[in-house]
Amino acid sequence: MKTLYLDCFAGIAGDMFIGALLNLVPSHAVLTEGIRKVKALDSEEYELITEQANRNGIAGINFDVKLNHHEHHHHHRHLSDIEAMIFSSDLSERVKRESIRAFSILAEAEAHVHGTTTDKIHFHEVGAGDSIIDIVGAFILMEALNWPRVLCSPVNVGSGTVECAHGILPVPAPATEYLLHGLPVFSSGSPMERTTPTGALLVKILADGFCSLPAGRIIASGYGLGNHESEDMPNVLRALMIESGNDNLNGLVHEKIAQIECNIDDMTPQDYEPVIEKLFAGNALDVWTENINMKKSRPGIKLCCLSRPEDTIKFSRIILEHTTSQGVRVKEYDRFRLNWNIESVSTSLGDVHVKTTTLNGETLRRIPEYEDVKAIAERHSISMWEARRMILREI
């Protein structure tokens, strides 16, 4: 599995993200060709600039969008305008979906700041062609990288003040601050805006978790350069592509996982179900309970949740908020597993999601997902056993 790690030690902006990812894709043409698919952006009204440069001696890619005078006078767009631009493009369905979701979240942030609704918001700088290119381009590059899992360091927001359409405001700007709610942030370095609304938006949408550098092999890296010079800290975003596993493990995948657990002796059995549902809804790897004996021989339950290391805080909070436990224990383990993927397969009974497990490229087994088999059995008024038998015969 590949993980894109964003090291935001000096902040993040849309152009910094694009520049960092351009180091990781095979050709910069994937971005220019992708942006041309947004036909509502007249290619004569902008120029994509990618150049090698450095900040404080750190070499990287400086990405910029040069707009002509006409475009700058037509950048107050509503959410519906931007949605129409993206819908009418020739971008892939996923890039369209992610781009529209990003602008919807940005509109919510702007509406919150102004005390209004999303349909009444008109974007200022972020509605301009260069920012549209930054956001849509980010998803074009993520698709070129085959949508890796994204992990992120805590985000440096900077300090001081920033001049925007609403005047001079303290850093982080209101929309940036709103988008970063619930995410780990800090302030370091000489005063300047280090994280922009677009940068905060991309972190909010793409990051699956926040942590220090995850375990694995670094297979590619690059720096995206910001627009400002800072004497004490290079204005750059570092992106690392990390691959988990090891070529010497006979085809197995090596990864770190965490187990969160607690002992409980004062909850009724029925109360565990909603907690377990919340943990699974948060993408826990597994959740289970064990019967135990506690002090004074009282019967109790050990609630266990298996997760990725970067998700331990999220799941610990769910357990502590929705159980009577006063604390949890966390252990990290090495896990070795097979490669697998899930794909939708058409059968005579209907479409079924099938998990295919492989070892060294060879298929070991193909198993239809339980919920799909259950739904098909109910729809065709047959037993689970018969539905599974018929599906396995066709896949």
Image: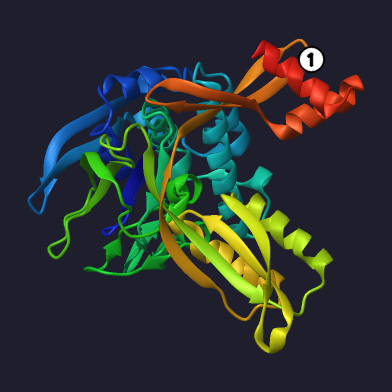
User: Measured from the top left, where is residue 69 in percent x and y?
Assistant: 34, 31
Viewer-side residue, 3 vs 348: 348
Q: Is residue 222 left or right of residue 185?
A: left
Give the answer, above or below, for where 251 lies relative to 221.
above
Q: Residue furthest left?
A: 57
Viewer-side residue, 208 vs 112: 208
Q: Identify the residue at image location x=35%, y=17%.
A: 33
Residue located beneath label 1 in the image: 349
User: Measured from the top left, where is residue 207 in percent x and y?
Assistant: 45, 49
Q: Residue furthest right?
A: 381
Colour pattern? rainbow
Q: Is residue 395 left or right of residue 341?
A: right
Q: Which amino acid type corresponds to the residue marked 1 in the rendered image?
A: Leu
User: Measured from the top left, where is residue 370 in percent x and y?
Assistant: 72, 33
Q: Identify the residue at image location x=52%, y=34%.
A: 99
Residue 88 seen in this snapshot = yes
Viewer-side residue, 319 vs 38: 319
User: Measured from the top left, where is residue 75 in percent x and y?
Assistant: 46, 36
Query: Where is the N terminus found, in terms of image quarters?
Result: top left
Query: Where is the C terminus found, in terms of image quarters?
Result: top right
Quarter location, residue 392: top right
Q: Is residue 48 left or right of residue 364?
A: left
Secondary structure at badge 1 equals loop
Q: Is residue 242 left or right of residue 389?
A: left
Q: Identify the residue at image location x=66%, y=78%.
A: 325
Viewer-side residue, 2 vs 223: 2
Quarter location, residue 185: bottom left
Give the answer, above or below, for where 372 lies relative to 6.
above
Residue 166 seen in this snapshot = no
Category of crowding for the residue at label 1, using alpha-carbon neighbours closer than 10 angstroms: few (below 14), some (14–19), many (at least 20): some
